[in-house]
Image (spheres, helix red, strand yellow):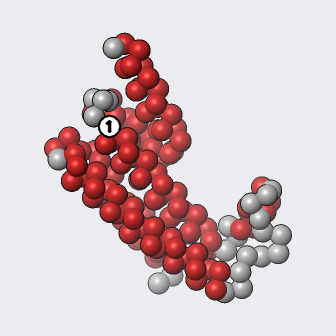
Amino acid sequence: MTPESLFSLASAAVLPGWLALAFAPLARARLVLLARVIAVLLSGLYVSLLVTGLAGDGPPAGASFNTLDGVRLLLSSPQALLAGWVHYLVFDLWVGSWEAEDNSVPHWLLLPCLALTFVAGPTGLLLYHLVKAGRKRRA
């Protein structure tokens, strides 16, 4: 499969997980589990991308986690960029499943947190914590 087709597949594969989280109050434990299973399966894709990427020529000279330019070089191949994208998809879905598992936040307040976690991970996580803290202060 080409990196482009794997990108499309991975991007589509997370959608059922996010839909499950949006409908979590209907069957919270099962729907959160479904989202997590999808995240774990995509983790397998991530690992295979890393292994096959390292089995080739390896990272380009100067690639590292120590500088912004080094990270740019790490992500300079389509396969490495795809691995980074899958990493993003998996972690955001996992964080969303963790948010949805929390019964202390009403679902109608959780939905904007999930939406933001889906499109801008840390922003949704921050909103979730602000909502949760605000509710604790009011209680």
**Left or right of residue 75: residue 137:** left
**Residue 60 sits above or below residue 10 on the image:** below
**Residue 125 sits above or below residue 40 on the image:** above
Q: Is residue 15 visible?
A: no
Q: Quadrant of residue 24?
A: top left
- Give the position of the C terminus as an image quadrant: top left
In percent of width and height, residue 81 lies at 61, 68
In percent of width and height, residue 98 lies at 38, 45
Q: Identify the secondary structure beneath mark 1.
A: loop
Q: Residues within 10 Å of mark 1 (few under 14, many from 20)?
A: few
Residue at x 52%, y 57% (from the top left corner): 88
Residue at x 38%, y 69% (from the top left corner): 41
Q: Read off the residue under disc 1.
A: 102
In percent of width and height, residue 133 lies at 44, 23
What residue occupies the far top of the structure in this picture?
A: 138
**Residue 61 sits above or below residue 19 on the image:** below
Residue at x 42%, y 67% (from the top left corner): 42
In percent of width and height, residue 30 lies at 21, 53
**Left or right of residue 80: residue 74:** right
Looking at the image, how many numbered discs can be counted on the residues? 1
Q: Is residue 85 visible?
A: yes
**Left or right of residue 3: residue 33:** left
Residue at x 51%, y 78% (from the top left corner): 48
Residue type at numbered disc 1: Asp
Q: Nearer the viewer, residue 103 or 3?
A: 103
